Amino acid sequence: MFLINPYIYGSGGTDPVPDYIALYKFEDNGFSSETEVVTDYVAKYEFEDNGTDKSDNSHDATMSNVTYSDVSGVSNQGKYGIFNGTTSYGQVTDHADVQNIQSSSCWIYLNSFGQNGLAKIWDKGVPRLYVNDLTDNLIFAIAFSTKNGVWGSNSSTITLSTWIHVGATYIMDGNIANNAILYINGVAVTTTKTTTPAGTLNSLVGQDLFIGNRSALEKTFDGNIENLRLYNRVLTPTEILSIYESEGSTFDATMSNVTYSDTGGVTGQDKYGIWNGTTSYGQVTDHADITDLKTVSCWVYAVSSGKNASGRIFDKGTNATMLQLTPNKHLTFYKIFSTTVGLWSTDINSILYNTWYHVAYTYDMDDNVATNPIFYVNGVSVNITESITPVGTMTSDTGSDLYIGDRSDHARTWDGRIENLRLYNRVLTPAEIQAIYNFENT
């Protein structure tokens, strides 16, 4: 599984509503997919099993002595390239698109600091981005006619045997006063200019781009590289952080006592998670982006109404914001207000046991007691009853972890299957809910 936007299912087709905050397929883990961000790269290399450029520019890398993983790398990411520290490299034929690289971003996992202690992440003559074993840091260099410019992060900012997201930006306009900005795990780090450039900026025309090495092939990367992105503009700190968060494990669920199917679930879909009705759950650490979610969509297959006859599909703080199934075989949605909780339910027998359903709710989270959620079953809005009218001001669920198939005290375990849980921070339209249902049910 890899970050997907558009998301292509085995049945084919482009995801009609790809701006989810997170999507959980539950194929064999709780990894989340987030909508891909900052997509104007001139080249992108995922290294799943080759050096194919995933942009529309066809700057494919010829890979030599690089192998590929059989399992996912960085959390929600796909597979990765494995560089052997001696003879591995990727080579991209020179092109105008890669003669003006002003930003780069990728994930690295170092076994060592590479051949001769100076492992190259990417190199186009000079500029280049690499790591240094003498100071355990990240270094960016750029060639000028009289003296090259060199910038490095602080010592000991690069750690072996762990996945790290690294980025670099530099304005390629020939101004010797420009400084590189280096990023580690989405955040700009203290960067020192160790050599001040002098003269004029060297031309990069005619020099191939090397990945995991340089043209002399004596600075081989020793470890894994994944999701290398190259841009011909300077990305902002916010954009670098958004790439790190979208590609990393920000919204991954820690799964406990959940098993996974060996076969597909809903027609056209992949595998699914199986909750045992007593001890299963998924837990996602709280984050601002998953606070007061306005739309939740998923497929469910209930065997019973769950633990204590109130199996939770989704819960963000006990009774703060949640969706559950009751013995009357209807869905209920809670939202806490300061005086009286709001409670809404679908009709009795709207969700029968041992049957797959697509279910969704939308709720505006606008602190208006007159606002009602909209429930959808199999892509169509259904009748709801307001069992309890909310009173007071809405209570935010910020600070509460997100639970999937249970709640925080583990007293409301789902009994059955869940597949393709989508989280959005906007209210989807009826047409969008219908489009998701049609897309996933093919």
Image (cartoon, grey):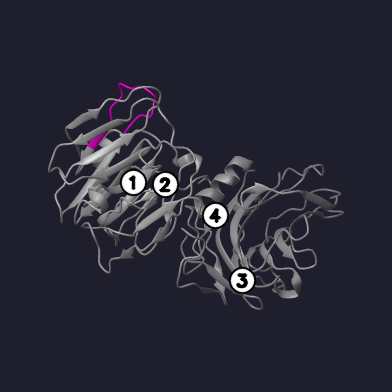
Return the residue at label 1.
314
**CB within 8 Å, label 4 to label 3:** no
Residue at (14%, 37%) from the top-left corner? Answer: 347
**CB within 8 Å, label 1 to label 4:** no
- Which sits earlier in the primary sequence, circle 1 or circle 3? 3
Of the residues shown, which amino acid type is indicated by label 3? Gly
Question: What span is in magenta?
Answer: 362-375
Discs 4/3, front: 3
> Can residue 41 be seen from the camera position used here?
no
Quadrant of the frame with the N terminus: bottom left
- Inter-mark Cα distance, 4 to 2: 35 Å
Of the residues shown, which amino acid type is indicated by label 2? Leu
- Which sits earlier in the primary sequence, circle 2 or circle 3? 3
What kind of element bears circle 4? strand
**CB within 8 Å, label 1 to label 3:** no
- Inter-mark Cα distance, 2 to 3: 34 Å
Return the residue at label 2.
402
Of the residues shown, which amino acid type is indicated by label 1? Phe
Q: Where is residue 211 shown, x and y percent of the image?
A: 62, 65
Q: Where is residue 411 shown, x and y percent of the image?
A: 33, 51
Density class for disc 2 (Cα within 10 Å; few <14, some 14-19, many ≥20) is: many
**CB within 8 Å, label 2 to label 1:** yes
Magenta-colored stretch includes residue 10: no
Return the residue at label 4.
43
Q: Where is residue 156 shown, x and y percent of the image?
A: 75, 61
What kind of element bears circle 1? strand
- Which sits earlier in the primary sequence, circle 4 or circle 3? 4
Return the residue at label 3.
223
Residue furthest to the left in view is 349
